[in-house]
Every structure is written in structure tokens, then in C-alpha cells.
Amino acid sequence: SEKTAHVIKVKAGKKPKIKIVKSKARIPFGGFMARYAIDDIYHAIAQARTALVFVNTRAQAEMLFQHLWEANTQALPIALYHGSLSKEQRRKTESLMATGELRAVVCTSALELGIDWGDVDKVIQVGAPKGVSRLLQRIGRANHRLDEPSDALLVPANRFEALECQAAITAIKKGQLDGESPQPGAMDIIPQFILNCLCSYPSTPEALYKEILNATPYQGLDKDDFNKLWQFTLDGGSALNAYERYQRLTKNNDGTYSPANKRVIQRHRQNIGTIVEAGRLKVKRIRRGNQGKVIGEVEEYFAQQLVPGDTFYFAGQVLKFEAIRDMQLHAKPANAKEAKIPSYAGGQMPLSTFLADGVRDILASPSMWRNLPAQVKEWLGLQQAFSTLPSPGQLLVEQFPFRQTHYTLFYTFDGRKANQTLGMLITRRMEKMGIKPLSFSVTDYGLSISAVNRISEAQLTTLFQPDILGDELEDWMLQAPMLKRSFRQVAVVSGLTEQRYHAAQKTMKQVTFSTDLIYDTLREHDPDHILLTVARADAERELLDIKRLANLLIRYVGKTTLVNLEKVSPMAIPIVLDVRSEQIKGAGAHAMLEQANLYAEAESMLDEVRALLS
């Protein structure tokens, strides 16, 4: 239809009240746990009728809940809620919340949508929101009535996150929202869709292609790509069509196609789905022998790191690992104060492009600093006096000696994934140019590279070019394991391999072993196989953030500002040290001492800048 669509905008209710916490404690340079503000968070909970305390990952939820319980001098009823807890525990928390028996719930995005309690009068966001729309969605859980403004407290985990929080508040006041533009549909789902249809009724490839084109994300689907995906669904393609396992379709007398046999239908129905999660093990809290209760799940790769006696936080408790039996992780309650933390694959959320632009605007406009915490304002002031601040349309690059090497800082503000990819590519090019890079570290805000030699203005211009996405990217992707990781997901969704067969659930290790073998076979005998092409595109989008990186490179071609310094600049400190207190390695006491030393070093570096300016 060519009729014009009419968009109706409903007048919003009262604007939310949003503040950044004003803590007397020192705001750290890095980390994502906001441990410095535990007393402030607890005070806000105590002042509220009922509070939702949002964090960005399940690991953060576990740790924050533990810290709040340690600070819970008033014995307030505080609960924990995230998607890896058992269904029974989640339902119990929901019931207690609905009846007003809880003062606070530490939660993830699992409570963002669909659950509204009228008694919730305060939302506390711990850590940067990473996006304006996400933050507004969370804030809306408080005072969920048209005539009352939502009340929210933002608790940045570090100094850069304070800028993110302020950028989000400014955008909300202006009524500006972010959001990703519509993306093309995933190609690996098409073979699954074809089988879904043919398990219900016979059809032809032409009819299915027309049906797929009716879906907006697939309106641009190339006919040649569809034909290759159809051929894969039919018999696996030229390298696999000799195997009976991949002969999934048969042609009927009327020219339509149907599943080859009932076994194809059965295997397909057992594996329908598009979300391939990391392998998980049920966590069973045992008391005597092997008797106990399942209290949730952890990801398989985390469990494989544990040895008997290791402790970890889960479901608000410290547990001691015993063994893995029958796809269950057996653990006993422990009294240890330090513990390893469950780590979940969903933990990396990039800074949205919209919010990154807001952070750049704040840095370039000192008049916008007035609502920032005093420590953050001083930090930015020192940066302005000692070096310079990033400005719109220019990429700030700093260079200084540190730890007997030369460090180069790129302030990109384009997210950890894009910076990680940029670091891998630039260091490869630096190696070719004889600069001799040693290592690099990344945050959402920038990239730090240490090298034996300094970078000149001319070399910087050569380094920061869009053509780095050519040869360097190709060489790296062929050598790195990321394509196999991406291929594993494509293989499961498309039906090339299975996670479930009859009543058995394959472990992620078994699935990976199978898909790695197929990947190597296709690379050798059918390098143009459509699933290899799909895996490559998915890796560039999901793992490397190539589109965002390409935009970054194009935006700053010939627009770099190189500043040579005698010391580490204030803004470089968190990126150079990569201070993340939650990366605990080895014994807890040793790790805490190591992190304390990093924080002391960061403060000492800032004192050196103050001394040089005085």
C-alpha cells in the first residue's frame, strides 16, 4: 500500500526526577561495581518505600547484593533477581515484592519489562546505563502512575561513567531517545524457517522466497543468497551432500518439497530456536552426600575453571565447589569472605553511539560540568590544563612515556568491541612499520597502546586510515578463532548441527568439537559455502563491531590531534591502568592488595599532574 502512515505521539507524563549520587568517598578511576558508594546506595534504599536497584550484568547483581547485605545494619529485607536464578526463586521474589514485603530488589534487565509494582518509589541505577532508552525504561518502574514523576538515582561506577550518566540525564530532559536503526535479518535463520514451513505444508522455493520478502528485515534478501541457503537446506551443499544426515528435503510429484522423512521433522522440532546460549550447568546446593536443591545455573565455561575447594558468589550466597556430576555443579555453603564471581557471556554492553556523542559534547563544553560530582569536575579541569579535551570532529591522541615504554592513547568513545578490534588492527600495522608495539588495553572510551618506539605525526596519519579494514583485518580474522566461534552459532541456528537429540542435551564442548570439524572441512573443500559467508558477516557485526569502527575511521581521516606529554594525562589514567577491580585473579586477599596498589598508583599519577600545574 502507498497510503501515508500517521504517527500519533502521546503527550508524556511528568518528567522524571533524576540525580547523580553525591558521595563523599573517592570515585574510582575504573571498575564497574561502585563499591565506593555502597553506603550511599544503602541510605537511598532505607529512605525509600520500595526500591529497584538495577545493574547491567548478573555478575554485578551477585556482587552488589553481597555488599549490600554486609552493609545492612537495619536488617532490611533485600532480595536478588536475575535470569540465572531458578524459576522458584524468581517467583518467590515476585510474590514478596507484590505484597510489599521487600524494601529493595537488586536486579538486571529481567525486571525491566512487564512487571509493575505500585509501591516502587525509587529506582537506583548502579553503573552507566549505556543507552538513554534503556535508562528511561528502568526509571519508569518507579511511581508507575501517570500523575507522579519517576524518581531515580544514578550511581556511576567510575569517573568516565559519571559523564555517561550526565549525558543520559541531559538527553532525557530534552526528550531525546537513542535506538539502533533497523538491521537486515540474520541469514542463518532462513534454513530454519524453510524447514518450519515444510514441516507444516509442502511448498516450493519460489513461494517461500516471496513469503520471506514480506518480512521487513528481509526485503533486501538477494535471490542468489536465498538459492544458496535453499541448497544447503536441501542437501547441505556440495561438500556435505554425500552424507545422508544432510539430505533433509525430497521433491514431490507436483514440484513441491517436503521433509525427507519423519526423522528430519523430529530432529528439527527438537532444535527450533534462534538464541544459542553458552552451555550451562545447573547449580545444586548440597547438604549431605549428593542430596540438595537446584538454585540456578552458571555457564559451562565458568564451571570448567573451578577446582574443588574454589568458592564463588551465587544466588546471594558464597558456595564452595565440590564437583560436576550429570551436568550439575555440586556446591556446598561456605563461610569464605572472598570468592570468585560467576561470569556471564552477556556482560559486555557497548556504549550507544547516541550516548557517546553526548559524552563528547560534555567534554567539549565546560558549562555542562556544573552538575557533575566535584571530583569529576576537578579531574576534567586538570585534563584541560595539562593536555587538552576531546573536541567534536577531532580525534584526540596523546603520547607519553610510562613504565619504560611509549604509550599512545586514542580517545574514541566508540565502545569496547570497536576499540578491541581497532587495537588488534593498529598493532599489526605498527609491527609492519617497525614501531614495535608491546600490548594494548581498551575501555568503552579509548584505546591505549604501549610500544618500544614513539609514533610520529606522519606515522599516525598512516596508522589511522580506513584501509586498515582491508589486509590487516583479513589476516587477523583468518588467524584468530573468532570465525569458528561465529560459525558455531550459525551452525546451530541453521540446523547444520544440533544441541538436542532425543532426550540428550549436548554440552557446548561437544557442539564446538563438531562445528570446528565441519568448519575446517568446508574451508578446505567448499570455501564459498554460504554458511562460511554468513559466519564471517556475523563475526564482523557481533564480535568486532566493524560497522561502528568503519564509521570511526572515516569520521576522523585527517582529523587527528596528537599531543606529546611528559606524564600520563588525567583522562589517560583509567585507560592506561585499566583499573577493573572485579577482575579477581588468584587468592582474594592478594587480588585486593593488587587492586589497592593500582588505585594508589592512579592517585599518585594525578598528584604528579597537580604538582606540574601548580
Image (tube, rainbow, N blue to C red):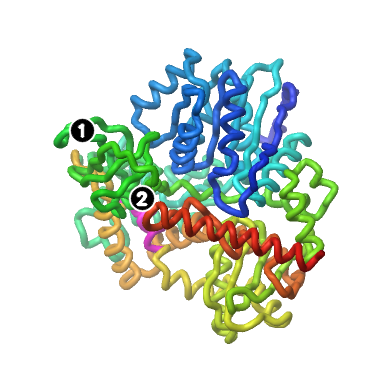
Is 518 situated above or below 563? Answer: above
**Identity of the residue drawn at 31% across and 68% down:** 520
Residue 107 in sight from this viewpoint: no
Residue 442 in sight from this viewpoint: yes
Q: Residues within 10 Å of mark 1 (few under 14, many from 20)?
A: few
The circle on residue 494 is: 2
The x and y percentages for residue 452 are 58, 82
Residue positioned most to the top = 99
Residue 459 location, quadrant: bottom right
C-beta proximity under 8 Å, tags 2 and 1: no
In the image, 536 versus 250, the foreground residue is 536
**Identity of the residue drawn at 68% across and 68% down:** 568
Q: Identify the element where label 1 is drawn.
A: strand
The x and y percentages for residue 427 are 55, 75
Residue 267 location, quadrant: top left
Residues drawn in magenta? 483-495
Q: Circle 1 is placed at which residue position?
A: 287
Residue positioned most to the right = 367
Q: Identify the element where label 2 is drawn.
A: helix
Q: Residues within 10 Å of mark 2 (few under 14, many from 20)?
A: many
The x and y percentages for residue 69 are 46, 32
What amino acid is found at the position of numbered circle 1 in the picture? Arg
